[in-house]
């Protein structure tokens, strides 16, 4: 995503504060404010890295979103925490299109987890904003079914799935 490429510090410095600390064998829920910090930092780093073909930071973003899902946090709750997050990894507040992209990414994770019936106390995919849900539900369904049928991202042509969606 070119709009974050030049504004943010290098990726290697962006994630230095995301190091995990050892904990007891019983994991405790991550406070939603810390989860928001992880989402914020990994989102900016993922945008920078994707521009060069690296996906490690995107995986960190997905893992943080999955943690929010496991803890039963809704998309609106995460959005509120992100809005209150004091960290600005981009070196400035996110532009509206960047914040919108982050919301779409969060929503895609939640829709995917709902679609694969990932254990949750409630159907958190229903907390995805209606416009995003209506735009991406069938796409997520098609990608999940393709994966179940043995396709991987190298063999699955996402462009074809997207085109099918537009044609319906």
Image (cartoon, rainbow, N blue to C red):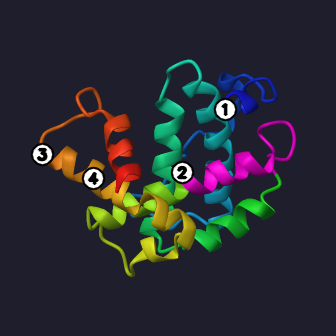
Q: Which is nearer the N-term, disc 4 or disc 1? A: 1
Q: Which residue is mark 3?
A: 149
The residue identified by callout 4 is 142
Residue 47 locus on image (x, y percent): 62, 33
Q: Nearer the viewer, mark 2 or mark 4?
A: 4
User: Which of the two labelled residues, at mark 2 and mark 1, occupies the earlier sequence position?
Assistant: 1
Q: Mark 1 — residue? A: 16
Image check: 8 left or right of 126?
Answer: right
Number of residues whose C-alpha sits closer than 10 Å to that of mark 3, classed few (under 14), some (14–19) or many (20 or more): few
What separation in Å lies between label 4 and label 1 (alpha carbons)? 36 Å
Q: Which mark is residue 105?
A: 2
Residue 137 on the magenta span: no
Q: Quadrant of residue 18?
A: top right
Label 3 vs label 2: CA separation? Answer: 24 Å
Q: Earlier in the sequence, mark 3 or mark 2?
A: 2
Q: Which residues are magenta?
A: 87-104
State the image coordinates of residue 46 (x, y, percent, origin top left).
Answer: 59, 34
Looking at the rendered image, the quarter that the C terminus falls into is bottom left
Which residue is most to the front? 167
Q: Residue at x 48, y 30 (%)?
A: 56
32 with respect to 111 (left or right):
right
Q: Secondary structure at mark 3?
A: loop
Looking at the image, the residue that sits furthest to the bottom is: 122
Q: Nearer the viewer, residue 34 or 126?
A: 126
Of all residues shown, which one is farthest toward the top?
Answer: 52
Secondary element type, mark 2: helix
């Amino acid at each position: 995503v070119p709009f974050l490429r030049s504004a943010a510090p290098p990726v290697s410095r962006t994630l230095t504060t995301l190091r995990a600390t050892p904990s007891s064998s019983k994991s405790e829920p991550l406070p939603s404010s810390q989860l928001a910090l992880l989402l914020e930092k990994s989102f900016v780093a993922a945008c920078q890295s994707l521009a060069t073909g690296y996906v490690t930071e995107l995986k960190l973003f997905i893992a943080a979103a999955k943690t929010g899902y496991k803890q039963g946090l809704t998309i609106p709750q995460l959005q509120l925490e992100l809005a209150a997050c004091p960290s600005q990894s981009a070196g400035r507040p996110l532009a509206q299109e960047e914040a919108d992209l982050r919301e779409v990414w969060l929503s895609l994770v939640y829709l995917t987890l709902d679609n694969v019936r990932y254990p949750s106390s409630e159907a958190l995919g229903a907390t995805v904003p209606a416009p995003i849900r209506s735009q991406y539900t069938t796409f997520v369904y098609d990608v999940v079914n393709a994966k179940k049928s043995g396709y991987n991202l190298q063999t699955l042509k996402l462009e074809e799935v997207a085109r099918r969606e537009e044609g319906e």
